[in-house]
Amino acid sequence: MEKLKALSGEHQLASYEDACQSFEWTQAEALFSWDLTGNVNTAYEAIDRHAEGELATKLALLYFDGEREERYTYEDMKRESNRAGNVLKSVGVEKGDRVFIFMPRSPELYFILLGTLKLGAIVGPLFEAFMEQAVHDRLLDSEAKVIVTTEALLPRIPVDQLPHLETILIVGDEVKEAGKIIDYRKLAGDASTDLDITWVDREDGMILHYTSGSTGKPKGVLHVHNAMVQHLMTGKWVLDLQPDDIYWCTADPGWVTGTSYGIFAPFLNGATNVIVGGRFNPEFWYSVIERFGVTVWYSAPTAFRMLMGAGEEAFEKYDLSSLRHILSVGEPLNPEVIRWGNESFGLRIHDTWWMTETGAMMICNYPTMDIKPGSMGKAIPGCEAAILDDRGQPLPPHRMGNLALKTPWPSMMRKIWKNDAKYESYFWGDWYVSGDSAYMDEDGYFWFQGRVDDVIMTAGERVGPFEVESRLVEHPAVAEAGVIGKPDPVRGEIIKAFIALRKGYEPSDELKAEIQKFVKEGLAAHAAPREIEFKDKLPKTRSGKIMRRVLKAWELNLETGDLSTMED
Ligand code: 6R9
């Protein structure tokens, strides 16, 4: 390990151990302007506060998509998010309304997201890759009032089936207005750059991220403005953001990482934040680090593995010496990725663990802590993590069990949209139970073991098997479908579907391809099964549930375990 560069300079978290002893969340409050004014709004704290202070002319956002480069200071960000807020206001957006954003990454997306928050409305960011069904489920469940999108994505919005949707704002150059469709840029061009921010309560809704569980449709995880407390502090402690840093989080805002750490943590900390448009491509990514001199880089194992796969040749073309701190989230950080990081950058990749539901980082590796490669690290100051047995009792070190967090913490989800029962099901007494299994070692480091449920993690995306199965059975040839995650060296897991065909259909490669296309077009490319296997019959419980555990055992040549609940 002597090859590793020392993480230079003073760190924001001087001593992890000291902070754990003495830190209380109330200490963080003095860092916000609302501590003095009583006026709360995350967008104000993230942007306007800096624009009105010493950081006014500091670069806030650097955008590059391979062709177009744009740069915005904090002052610019304030003006542009005000403008976006005024556009939304002019179409009737009010506090508490749900506004969805469904467009490729661009500076405008960020202005619109911040502008939504400035009105006290709740923002719902969607992946650009979502197809009609996925868009429909999210807009319907949340009763979205407005969606901001592009002409190209418009056909994926089933307007007739969304009774609450009042306005579709299209961001484009030549927009044909009709019915609910309005030209965003025309309004933005005329909009004022002054806006009276709507002050909210710290417990008011801010952002709604839909995420997948093992059953049912994706669920809407609601976060409130108070989450900013944890975004700010983890940005300091874990990202270690310093005044001169150029920070790049590679995640899309459709994923919680792309908002909590692609927007809130960096801007709350007054950092210079890099945003990249366009598709993943190893050389392009390296070129971004070189172009902007990125110093702190937050990405995911899948991306690291793809960069690894692109080989040294791609790597050596670029000057990547600006990097000083690299972090990872979303999946287990494999030893070979850590090794690659050490050898390529002379830096150890720091793993972080958290979930859509936790809203912010919970278990992490800190610059000032000894890292045990392969461990997710330790709970952040002010939070407590433990391993519980199935009755909710804490287990001693080295015993595998349910990874749980002591409630509450500032960024904890406050609601599953219109599903209180689901929300309650996460909590065992004072504990939030994550659905991950893990163990803790004698030094308090946590080691990830797997998901307790059937949720699939493919290329960093969380996919619920049920959602894919539901789509599959809509295909005329499919009688039954069971979907599992199959271990894959690059993607972590890939989606594999077992399918029983309806009478009159025969297995064939053409049919496989057609079914894959059907899922891709209905849900999203990342949700389509990369492998399909046809079976005469699928293993089911007596109550009719597909037994994914048995499918998985078949796939991996494991013992099938207890089959008492399986139908004959
Ligand atoms: C932020 C985010 C959450 C699930 C989580 C776990 C997996 C996340 C991880 C990790 C191993 C890590 N996960 N970080 N597994 N090591 N460092 O990823 O949110 O999309 O909701 O996924 O991701 O299984 O329960 P989300």
Image: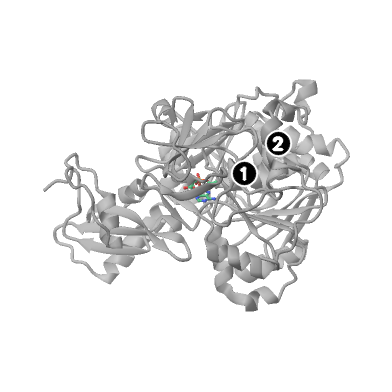
- Report the amino acid beneath label 2: Ala
Q: Position of residue 440 (x, y in %)?
A: 50, 44
Circle 2 crowding by C-alpha within 10 Å: few under 14, some 14–19, many from 20: some
Q: Position of residue 267 (x, y in %)?
A: 73, 43
The vertical placement of 187 against 319, above or below, is above
Name the element at disc 2. helix
Quadrant containing the N terminus in the rendered view: bottom right
- Report the amino acid beneath label 1: Thr
Q: Mark 1 or mark 2: which is in front?
A: 2
The numbered mark at residue 19 is: 2
Counting residues from the start of the chain, the first of labels 1 and 2 encountered is 2
In the picture, measured across the screen, residue 63 lies left or right of residue 151, that is right
The vertical placement of 545 against 336, above or below, is above
Label 1 to label 2: alpha-carbon separation: 26 Å
Q: Is mark 1 within 8 Å of ligand 1?
A: no
Q: Which residue is mark 1?
A: 259
- The residue located at (54%, 62%) in the rendering is 335
Most distant residue in the left direction: 568
Circle 1 crowding by C-alpha within 10 Å: few under 14, some 14–19, many from 20: many
- The residue located at (79%, 33%) in the rendering is 194
Name the element at disc 1. helix
The numbered mark at residue 480 is: none
- The residue located at (50%, 37%) in the rendering is 386
Q: Position of residue 394 (x, y in %)?
A: 45, 33
The vertical placement of 505 against 14, above or below, is below
The vertical placement of 215 against 511, above or below, is above
Please state which of residues 116 and 345 is positioned toward the viewer in this rendering: 345
Please state which of residues 258 and 25 is positioned toward the viewer in this rendering: 25
